[in-house]
Amino acid sequence: MSFELTPKFTGGKLINANLKAEILATNEKSAEYGLVLTEQDAAMLVQTGKETIALQDRIEIGKSITVKLIEKFMQSTYISQNDYADTIAALLDVFYEAKEESGDSLTDDEVIGIMFDFFEKESGGSIEVLQTRDMDYLCRKIRYAADGIAED
Amino acid sequence: MSDIIMHLPFSESDTDIQNYTASLLRLCSVNGLIPEKRQLEIRSELDSTFSETAEQYTKAESSTIPLKIAEQLYSSVLYQCDVYLLSLKSLSKAVEALLNISVKTIISSGRILILQMIEDSKAVFRKAYEKRLALPACEYRYAMDKAFDDFLRNYSARFDARNICTSIDYPLLNTAAYDMKSQGVMFILEYYTGIMLENEFCSYFSEKDIADTLVQYGKIYRCKYTDLLFNIAEVLLDNMLTAVLLNKPMFTLSISDKDIDKLYLQYGNYSENDILSAVKKAFQPYTEKLSPALSEYLKMHFEKFSCELCKGVLNNTLGNFLAVTTLTVN
């Protein structure tokens, strides 16, 4: 057996071995908002998270971003049971793009907070609008926040 | 120490000093010296230290980091191991440590050594700075006035230990900075120890004599010396050693056309080894004047000097090698 010390970063994550279970555990709280993820949804989100993170040349080192997004966006007034899982999956893309824009100077919670406000107030709860029409605006907002510049 | 460690089937030259821990583990693994269970333990401890380091890096405020940063952090963890294992100054002891000491202990010992080396570097730099030259040589000035401060400001023993976190172009006597094998704080300590000794050497000459010699050196290349990237001590030492061979008074820098003629006459039939022996002999009185560390440091240049002088005498090109005071450039 040859000893290889290069860490296997390319797998996308080192820690969250029980991610599917963690995602399903959020149902306990989200049920209060009428939102529940199935086993299939959780598996899809695990896979999407893994692919997105690998595409962004990042690795996961702490609490899953997917879980953080779920915990915040379950409070949205716009997300319904029908589009819950797909919206979270789409938000993963938006998150990493926004995180990149911040030059890693904003914390996950700050980025997610800005995304949430934007989703609720600017994009009218539409992930399509956020991803297309409003993405540049969101990125600008993130950059301003990262630079500590107040925006009108 | 076990028999197998006493008689290792590989040598220091098989290791990679720039990736010491990883290369040792690979050699041990290939040669069946390390059980698979121990390999997994080491891997697991390294991964666990990496995870802790990454969490500290983000202050636990980010769940992801760019791959580039992850590689830097992992390399930093391995560098801490490298520093400890290299400090043992013995291949057998390093292998024994890897097989028997917990990686966490190796890492924390390495980190303590790094912090000590940062302090040692500060002391060395202070001495170097006290004897710095007030010359308009750009890269030298940068190494003295800016590079070390940048290192102190940017270096992180925990997050970026393998890099020097500053920019250094000025070469040492005999070694270009980019050719040095050491990394991180080990590089800084080695580099500024060299600069300290070189500044000590230069302090034996007046600034005017140094400046005059360097002006002549620039003329070899038909430009100002300030436009050249070269080692100041090397130019001075070459001239001084030449003066030594010509039995001139101690610490003489100026070499005239006549001196060059004498060199051709006196050393025309000398081999490189003959010149080396002559230099060693003629340098003897200097060892009583100079500190032992400085003497040893300067002696490392003798072979290169002898080779250059021999070539210069043979090819009639001493004027391209020495800063000659009254040399007429063709």
Image (cartoon, coloured by chain):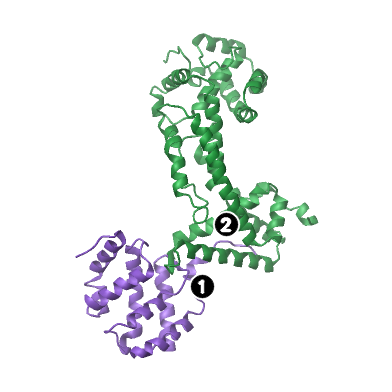
Chain colours: A purple, B green
- Residue drawn at x 64%, y 59% is B105
From the top left corner, tell me how far across and down residue B114 is, in percent.
57, 50
From the top left corner, tell me how far across and down residue A7 is, in percent.
54, 64
Location of residue B103 (image quadrant): bottom right
Does residue A107 appear left or right of residue B21 in this picture? left
Chain assignment, label 2: B
Chain assignment, label 1: A
Residue extending furthest toward the right: B3
Label 1 amino acid? Ile
> Would you place residue B36 above or below residue B237 in this image?
below
> The N terminus of chain A lies in which quarter of the figure?
bottom right
Q: Can residue A119 be seen here?
A: yes
Does residue B289 appear left or right of residue A69 in this picture? right
Label 2 amino acid? Leu
Mark 1 packing: few (<14 Cα in 10 Å), some, or many (20+)? Answer: some
**Mark 1, secondary structure of its residue:** loop
Does residue A86 appear left or right of residue B116 in this picture? left
Q: Can residue B10 be seen here?
A: no
Measured in 3D between alpha carbons, the distance from the residue under mark 1 to the one under mark 2, in whole angstroms, is 20 Å
Badge 1 and badge 2 in a common chain:
no
* CB within 8 Å, label 1 to label 2: no
Q: Which residue is mark 2?
A: B78
For residue A15, which numbered disc appears in the image? 1
- Residue B98 or A75: which is nearer the viewer? A75
> Would you place residue B101 above or below residue A90 in this image?
above
From the top left corner, tell me how far across and down residue B154 is, in percent.
44, 49
- Residue drawn at x 41%, y 70% is A53
Does residue A85 appear left or right of residue B53 in this picture? left
Location of residue B302 (image quadrant): top right
